[in-house]
Image (tube, rainbow, N blue to C red):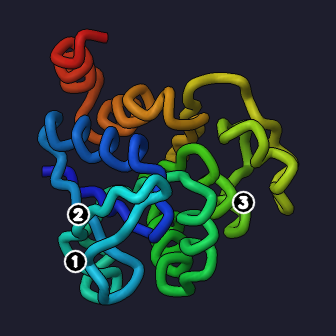
Amino acid sequence: MAKILLPLACGFEEIELVSIVDVLRRGGVEVVLASLDSALKVKGAHNISIIADTSLQEIKPNEFDAIALHGGMEGVQNMLASPTLLQIISDLASSHKLIGAICAAPLVLDELHLLTEDFCCYPECEKMMKHTQAQRLDLPCKTSDRIITGTGPAFAILFALEILKSLKGESKAQEVQKQLLL
């Protein structure tokens, strides 16, 4: 069974996080929510709290096939401030694992110099990119090799389906898409 890590940072964008978890679990992917620190209850950008399965300190990164990063500017700033998370992402990238980032989260990939091809992100975040020479695309999501980027909350389900397609194949993604009436 494919296994994906979803870091859970205070200030996460709730629509994105829950959409990713729901779509992937419907598709038979093992989803592990890991808080950035030992506090498992994490509050989102709109005051909705989610309880993580574990913390980043407790996980074994080599057990995961992929990682997906939610948006929410405060959440992304908290991810950028987590050396543990940045190291996990770097290690997964070095192992050619799938990496997804939606909304403001491509800023994390930019910080790690992982955005080498055109990408999607929340429009206002494009000007905040410091390292990439690639351009933001006005699309719901974009897959470039092992990196999937998404634009924002309105496209969270499409982003999650793209991750599912990469992990479980086109047939499984279409099956879940049909369940969701898309």
Location of residue 9 (image quadrant): bottom left
Location of residue 27 (image quadrant): top left
* Spot occupied by residue 61 in the image (x, y as percentages of width and height): 33, 75
Nearer the observer, disc 1 or disc 3? Answer: 1
Residue 123 in the image: above or below residue 146: above
Amino acid at dot 2:
Val
The disc, 1 or 2, on the residue closer to the chain's N-terminal end is 2
Q: Residue furthest front?
A: 47
* Rendered residue at 26%/47% (across/down): 21
User: Callout 1: 10 Å neighbours few (<14), some, many (20+)?
Assistant: many
Which residue was labeled with disc 2? Answer: 32
Residue 120 falls left or right of residue 65: right
Amino acid at dot 1:
Thr
Which residue was labeled with disc 1? Answer: 54
Kindly check if marks 1 and 3 are in contact, taking CB atoms under 8 A apart as contact: no
Helix, strand or loop at disc 2?
Answer: strand
Which residue was labeled with disc 3? Answer: 110
Name the residue nearer the viewer: 23 or 2. 23
Residue 54 in the image: above or below residue 29: below
The disc, 3 or 2, on the residue closer to the chain's N-terminal end is 2
Kindly check if marks 3 and 2 are in contact, taking CB atoms under 8 A apart as contact: no
Name the residue nearer the viewer: 97 or 82. 82
Amino acid at dot 3:
Asp
Helix, strand or loop at disc 3?
Answer: helix
Residue 116 falls left or right of residue 7: right
* Spot occupied by residue 144 in the image (x, y as percentages of width and height): 59, 38
Q: CA distance from mark 1 to mark 3?
A: 26 Å
* Rendered residue at 64%/23% (across/down): 139
Q: Is residue 97 visible?
A: no
Kindly check if marks 1 and 2 are in contact, taking CB atoms under 8 A apart as contact: yes
User: Callout 3: 10 Å neighbours few (<14), some, many (20+)?
Assistant: some
* Rendered residue at 54%/82% (across/down): 82
